Amino acid sequence: MRRHLTIIMEQDSDGIFIVECPSFKGCRSYGETIEEAMDNIREAVEAYLGETPFTGDVTFIGVRDLEVNVA
């Protein structure tokens, strides 16, 4: 069975790509390139699924912006 999962990607000030699969709590990884980050998150997701059965009980809803004041 194949599932499509949402991946959130960010880039830090050092240029490292940080990736997260919000469907699985704590499932994060990183890489020096987008391709490396995606390979690493795939490995993390597969490891997660190897230990925890996929129940589909978490549904990714979306991403929102939040504006805050910074001193």
Image (cartoon, rainbow, N blue to C red):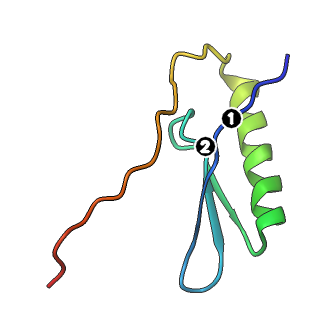
Q: State the image coordinates of residue 9 (x, y, percent, origin top left).
A: 61, 59
Q: Is residue 44 above or below residue 52?
A: below
What x and y, as percent, mark residue 10? 57, 66
Residue 23's place in the image compared with 63, above or below, is above
- Mark 1 closeness class: few <14, some 14–19, many ≥20 residues within 10 Å: some
Left of 71 or right of it: where is 58?
Answer: right
Q: Tell me the kind of residue under disc 1.
A: Leu
Q: Nearer the viewer, residue 41 or 70?
A: 70
Q: Is residue 1 above or below residue 34?
A: above
Give the residue at x 24% y 65%.
67
Amino acid type, residue under disc 2 in the picture: Cys
Q: On the rendered structure, is 66 left or right of 63?
A: left
For marks 2 and 1 on the same chain, the one whose residue lies earlier in the sequence: 1
In the rendered image, residue 68, in percent from the top left (x then y), is placed at 20, 68
Q: Nearer the viewer, mark 2 or mark 1?
A: 1
Q: Residue at x 65, y 76 (%)?
A: 16
In which image quadrant can residue 48 be found?
top right
> Do the numbered discs 2 and 1 sit on residues whose CB atoms are within 8 Å?
yes
Q: Residue at x 54, y 40 (%)?
A: 22
Tell me the quarter of the picture where residue 23 sits: top right
* Mark 1 residue element: loop
Tell me what residue is drawn at x 78 percent, y 45 percent: 42
Check disc 1 and report the residue beneath it: 5
Q: Which residue is mark 2?
A: 21
Answer few, some or many: residues within 10 Å of disc 2's Cα (few below 14, many 20 plus, some between 14 and 19).
many
Quarter of the figure with the N terminus: top right
